[in-house]
Image (cartoon, helix red, strand yellow):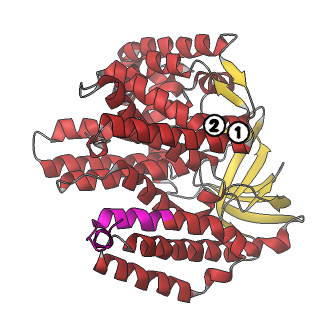
Amino acid sequence: MQWWVLKRRLHESWLVAAASFGVLLGCCGAQLANGYFADIGWLVLATLLLIVVFYVRRVWMVVVALVAGSLLGVWRGSCEQVNLVQYQPYYGHNLSLSGTVGDDVVESGGQAVVVLNKIKIDYRLPGKIRLTVAATSAKRGDLLTVSGKLTPGFGAYAGSIYRAHIDKLVEPVPGDVARRVRDWFATAVRKAIPEPRASLGLGYLVGQKSALPTDLTDALKVAGLTHAVVASGYNLTILVRLSRRLFGRISKFMAAFGSGCLIAGFMAVTGLSPSMSRAGLVSGLSLATWYYGRQFHPLILLVLAAAITTLINPSYVWGDLGWTLSFLAFAGVMLVGPIGQAYFFGDKPPGTVRQILGETIAAHLVTAPVIMLSFGTLSNVAIFSNLLVLPLVPLAMLLTFIAGIAGLVLPGVAAIVGLPANWLLAYMVKTVQVSAGLPWAQTEFQPALWLVAVSYVAMILVGVYMWRASRFNLRSASIVE
């Protein structure tokens, strides 16, 4: 490489990508640093280096940006490690603690999984704790006091209590207003649509999967359709594109404002799960750049969103499976899918079926190694079932919403108004059950970690080859278009 190339000025976005990648590396390494980098001086040094990077903006500053991002990430991760050390004296002891239910309670087999945040034992502690309790009426936003034996956590959890006992449950007023509105609307939907179809429609509409019966939840997993009923980027993509089409005729500002309100409202209703945090951030950033006439390169958007969410909660990168799968699926849809379309079909724009098929295959390929490593299973019918169900999800969302409005305004005729939604959801339930019931629907396989690593290296190499061969411009891939 000629020296003059290193002196060329570089676009800020690639420096942002390098710094973001550094943040991820630093946060990963913070687990080995034992809190050494928690001093504020490392944050100051990282900040000064970033100022220099964006002032100079030469090609060789990519390395400095990577170092600065790594320092920022290891500082933030070390601070979180220091905070979590406060739990050490409590591990292995029976105790009483209080906290706020941070997400929808998931019930299965007579037990419920509850995630508590804003933990208080002797004093306020950071992080969140996972509980398993007997069936409970607790909802997101409720205040719980529980007792049990605290054990070290896993993934994004600072601790866990198995078979915790709920000593006290308080429903604050007004509490989680968005959750109350969601539940109020869900009651109206159930006046118009019978179960389990109503819960499936609500899963599509607001990402509420906690009300789904266990057998349908298991069938959705086998059929590879869980992502459709989990609040994620797919739901937001539908809402943002709908808003753009509705308000874009008025003005670009109204389209952006309406989409932004839908993103904020949807996130408030569904809660800030790792996948929802990623989806909301990605949609918001993409919407902002679209409004100002610019476009994010998907690769830069991917690492930037990952870095921001990691800085907010470093435990995501330490083993949160939902966060990992969310970003892998995003990489499949925004990187692998468009490259595959361009390589096999050239410049011809994909139709609805081909686009869904391409995105499904891409997301399935990219997430499959981690799914098999984590669960030891892989859906063989995911592509087939997604093709039969996914194109109809936007219509199901609309019909479920109309049925819910009828349940609120005209409860006497809600069942009649809800018939179209009822029929469509019945077809979807049957499709899921038939797909999951096939004897070859699922393969059991537990790959070694090295095999997973090799598979991702192979995917990257093949993806780079297809990208170079097709000469596809990745900037044209946008979730708001």
Percent from the top left, x then y, of residue 311?
52, 67
| Residue at the far bottom in the pictured view | 41
Q: Is residue 321 above or below residue 27?
A: above
Residue 19 within the magenta-colored segment of the rendering: yes
- Judge the density around disc 2: few (<14), some (14-19), many (≥20) Cα neighbours within 10 Å: many
Tell me the quarter of the picture where residue 359 sits: top left
Place of residue 283 in the rendered image (x, y in percent of width and height, measured from the top left): 35, 49
Looking at this rendering, what residue extends furthest in the front direction?
Answer: 2
Task: Identify which residue is drawn at 17% across, 41% down.
Answer: 247
Q: Quadrant of the N terminus?
A: bottom left
Q: Position of residue 301 (x, y in %)?
A: 38, 54
Q: Nearer the viewer, residue 267 or 390?
A: 390
Specify whether 87 is left or right of 469: right
The reply to whether dot 1 and dot 2 touch (C-beta < 8 Å) is yes
Above or below for 42 versus 135: below
Local secondary structure at mark 2: helix
Helix, strand or loop under label 1: helix
- Mark 1–mark 2 Cα distance, whole angstroms, equals 6 Å
On the image, which quarter does residue 52 sit in? bottom left
Based on the displayed image, in which of its 4 quarters is residue 445 positioned? top right
Residue bearing the label numbered 1: 373
Say which residue label 2 marks. 369
Residue drawn at 40 percent across, 17 percent down:
421
Which amino acid type is marked by label 1? Leu
Magenta includes 187? no
Magenta-highlighted residues? 1-21
For the image shown, how many numbered marks are present on the structure? 2
State whether the magenta stretch is mostly helix, strand or loop.
helix
Quadrant the C terminus occupies: top left
Q: Nearer the viewer, residue 168 or 90?
A: 90
Q: Is 368 displayed left or right of 311 in the figure?
A: right
